[in-house]
Image: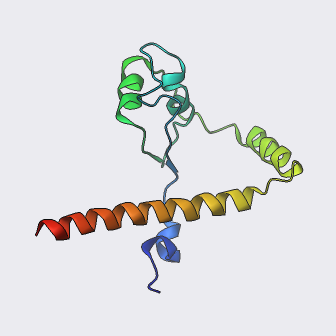
Amino acid sequence: MMQGWWESEETARGMLPVWVGDWGGGESSWRPGSPSSTRRPSDLVAPNTVNAMPEATLFATEDHGQIRGNAVAGTYEQARAHLDAVEKLGISYAGVVQSLETEGIQKFQQSWDTLLNAVRAAR
C-alpha cells in the first residue's frame, strides 16, 4: 500500500492541530445569542491551529463571540489532570486518539474518493 501524506514523518512535524466537530453550535442546535453557539470556538483559540467549524458557528462567533486571545495557554496542568482521571477510569487516551485518527482518515478518504469519482464521471 502506498504511504499516505498523513503517514509521512516529514509532514507530521509540520502539521497543526485542527479543531473539528459540530462545536455544540451546529445549524440544528444553534439559537441566536446562545452562549453555547460560541463557547467552544472561543475556548480553543490558540496560535498555530486550524479550525473547521460549521458556517453557522463561524457567523455566531463573528456576531457575538468573545475572543480573548490564546485561551489554551495556562490550562495544561488542568488538562493533564483530566486526562489522568480518564485513564484511571480505564479509558486509554492513546487508544481513543488512535481510533479517532483512524476513523477520521477513513472518512476523509471516503469523501475524497466520492469527490474523485464524481469528477471522473462528469468528464
> Quarter of the image holding residue 31?
top left
- Residue, far front: 121
Where does the image place residue 56, in percent across and percent down from the top left? 37, 29
- Nearer to the camera, 121 or 93: 121
Q: Which residue is drawn at 72% across and 61% down?
A: 94
In this rendering, the count of numbered labels is: 0
Residue 92 drawn at (x, y percent): 78, 57
Residue most extreme to the bottom: 1
Q: Colour scheme used in the picture? A: rainbow
Q: Considering only vertical position in the picture, is 67 above or below 102?
A: above
Residue 108 shown left or right of residue 19 in the figure:
left
Provide residue 112's location: percent of width, then percent of height: 34, 64
Q: In which quarter of the image is residue 27?
A: top left
Q: In which quarter of the image is the C terminus?
A: bottom left
In the displayed structure image, the side of residue 100 where residue 29 appears, left or right: left
Would you say 108 lies left or right of 104 here? left
Rendered residue at 69%/57% (across/down): 96
- Farthest residue in the top direction? 33
Residue closest to the far right: 88
Q: Locate residue 53, reporting x and y percent.
A: 43, 39
Q: In which quarter of the image is residue 63?
A: top left
* Residue occupying the point 55% across, 61% down: 103
- Name the residue located 89 percent from the left edge and 49 percent from the top edge: 88
**Depth order, front residue of 46/51:** 51
Above or below residue 106? Residue 28 is above
